[in-house]
Image (spheres, grey):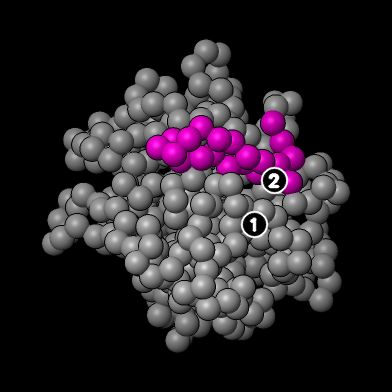
């Protein structure tokens, strides 16, 4: 089934409707985001928490089309429980950092929610769809539901399509297709789930395979190019931990159409090497934030990176908001406020509070008619 027209991939990047600085939009300078980004300690906030902090698993979150944060938390009856309860929340207003409960997420028949928390929560570019990964070990499922159903019916009453597909991380290409990075510690791949197909018979072919290492993150830029990483190098020769390869839109869509996936090791081009490529987020100026860590390989860790748009320069910057811990950051970019959110979901070296979210911002946002206006990229319709 083909899309009727090309669509914009990202949420609107022109005049943003809300600014945390409180300054009038017309008085703000335009961003030079790469050099202007800075960690804002005073903006640090906390995700919904349990009365007993030990009784929780890592939370995952993303931003809705209006800029509010939506959260999927995992609460445990006891701190050492194997299974937990998935609870959903939404920010009461953009930047409020207060939360409205949306109830307990209804699982697939026979489904269980592990204490390690959800694998991901991803809002589609148009804001209409949400996908979550249950992170189960044996029978992994990806749930897809409508944003309006979540907000009006609640997490326990809304209809959910649960697809039994393996997953580690995911990113929407448009309102229909979800790219999923999956695999194990020896090899990994990226599939493309068609969310219009039946959960009983999901269409989820690989578009990139043969990664010589563990699963990592996956993302798209504004031109629809696909980015895939090697999360932990396990095979001699070829790619290394943290390698991020770019696959052009025309190449990966052809792979999808033909049914012949691209080889990670021999196709595409090396974009950068950083950390474990465990979390990747483009901002509105095509700069790439990278999170994760290479603790086990004694490689890079304890920072998040920012790679400048190659069309503008070759700069690299690093940030470490939590200097008290040896950190591995998970990232989410808010295109409405222009903020990068970072938290620490995994207890890899020493205990960290995974409900704490650090904010990195470039400050002022673009005025109406500025360089972001109409610069949203297009997508090739998939069939």
Q: Residue at x 19, y 57 (%)?
A: 6
Most frequent secondary structure within the magenta stretch:
loop
Measured in 3D between alpha carbons, the distance from the residue under mark 2 to the one under mark 1, in whole angstroms, is 9 Å
User: Which residue was labeled with disc 2?
Assistant: 319
Question: Farthest residue in the top direction?
Answer: 237
User: Which residue was labeled with disc 1?
Assistant: 360
- The image position of residue 330, as x and y in percent, is 63, 51
- Judge whether residue 305 is colored magenta: yes
Query: In the image, is 325 to the left or to the right of 177?
Result: right
The quarter holding residue 352 reads bottom right
Crowd band around label 2 with a 10 angstrom C-alpha radius: few (<14), some (14–19), many (20+): some
In this view, the residue in front, 323 or 88, is: 323
In this rendering, is residue 353 above or below 253? Answer: below
In this view, the residue in front, 161 or 316, is: 316
Query: In the image, is 119 to the left or to the right of 359?
Result: left
- Judge whether residue 142 is colored magenta: no
Q: Which mark is residue 53?
A: none
- The image position of residue 12, as x and y in percent, is 37, 66
Label 1 sits on a secondary structure element that is strand
In this view, the residue in front, 67 or 86, is: 67
Q: Is residue 117 visible?
A: no
Q: Residue at x 29, y 53 (%)?
A: 377
In this rendering, is residue 234 above or below 105? Answer: above
Label 2 sits on a secondary structure element that is strand
Q: Residue at x 44, y 47 (%)?
A: 286
Crowd band around label 1 with a 10 angstrom C-alpha radius: few (<14), some (14–19), many (20+): many
The quarter holding residue 119 reads bottom right
- The image position of residue 220, as x and y in percent, is 39, 47
Magenta-drawn segment: 300-320
Circles 2 and 1, Cβ within 8 Å, touching? The answer is yes
In this rendering, is residue 361 above or below 291? Answer: below
């Amino acid at each position: 089934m083909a899309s009727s027209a090309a669509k914009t991939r990202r949420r609107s990047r022109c005049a943003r409707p809300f600014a945390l600085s409180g300054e009038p939009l017309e008085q703000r300078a335009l961003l030079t985001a790469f050099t202007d980004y800075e960690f804002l300690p005073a903006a640090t906030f906390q995700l919904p928490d349990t009365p007993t902090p030990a009784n929780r698993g890592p939370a995952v979150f993303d931003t809705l089309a209006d800029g509010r944060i939506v959260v999927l938390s995992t609460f445990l009856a006891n701190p050492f429980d194997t299974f937990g309860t998935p609870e959903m929340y939404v920010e009461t207003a953009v930047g409020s950092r207060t939360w409205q409960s949306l109830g307990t997420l209804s699982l697939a028949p026979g489904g269980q929610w592990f204490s390690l928390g959800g694998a991901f929560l991803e809002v589609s570019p148009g804001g209409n769809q949400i996908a979550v990964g249950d992170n189960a070990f044996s029978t992994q499922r990806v749930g897809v539901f409508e944003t309006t159903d979540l907000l009006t019916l609640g997490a326990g009453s809304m209809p959910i399509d649960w697809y039994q597909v393996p997953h580690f991380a995911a990113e929407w290409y448009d309102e229909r297709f979800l790219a999923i990075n999956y695999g194990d510690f020896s090899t990994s791949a990226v599939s493309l789930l068609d969310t219009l197909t039946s959960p009983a018979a999901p269409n989820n072919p690989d578009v990139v395979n043969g990664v010589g290492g563990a699963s990592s993150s996956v993302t798209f830029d504004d031109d629809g190019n696909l980015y895939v990483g090697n999360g932990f190098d396990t095979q001699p020769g070829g790619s290394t931990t943290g390698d991020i390869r770019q696959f052009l839109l025309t190449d990966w869509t052809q792979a999808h159409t033909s049914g012949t996936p691209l080889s990670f090791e021999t196709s595409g081009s090396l974009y950068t090497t950083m950390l474990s490529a465990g979390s990747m987020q483009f901002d509105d100026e095509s700069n790439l934030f990278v999170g994760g860590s290479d603790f086990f390989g004694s490689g890079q860790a304890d920072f998040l990176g920012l790679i400048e748009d190659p069309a503008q320069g070759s700069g690299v910057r690093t940030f470490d908001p939590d200097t008290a811990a040896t950190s591995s950051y998970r990232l989410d970019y808010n295109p409405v406020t222009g903020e990068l959110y970072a938290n620490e979901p995994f207890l890899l070296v020493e205990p960290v509070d995974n409900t704490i979210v650090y904010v990195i911002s470039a400050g002022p946002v673009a005025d109406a008619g500025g360089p972001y206006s109409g610069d949203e990229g297009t997508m090739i319709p998939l069939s």
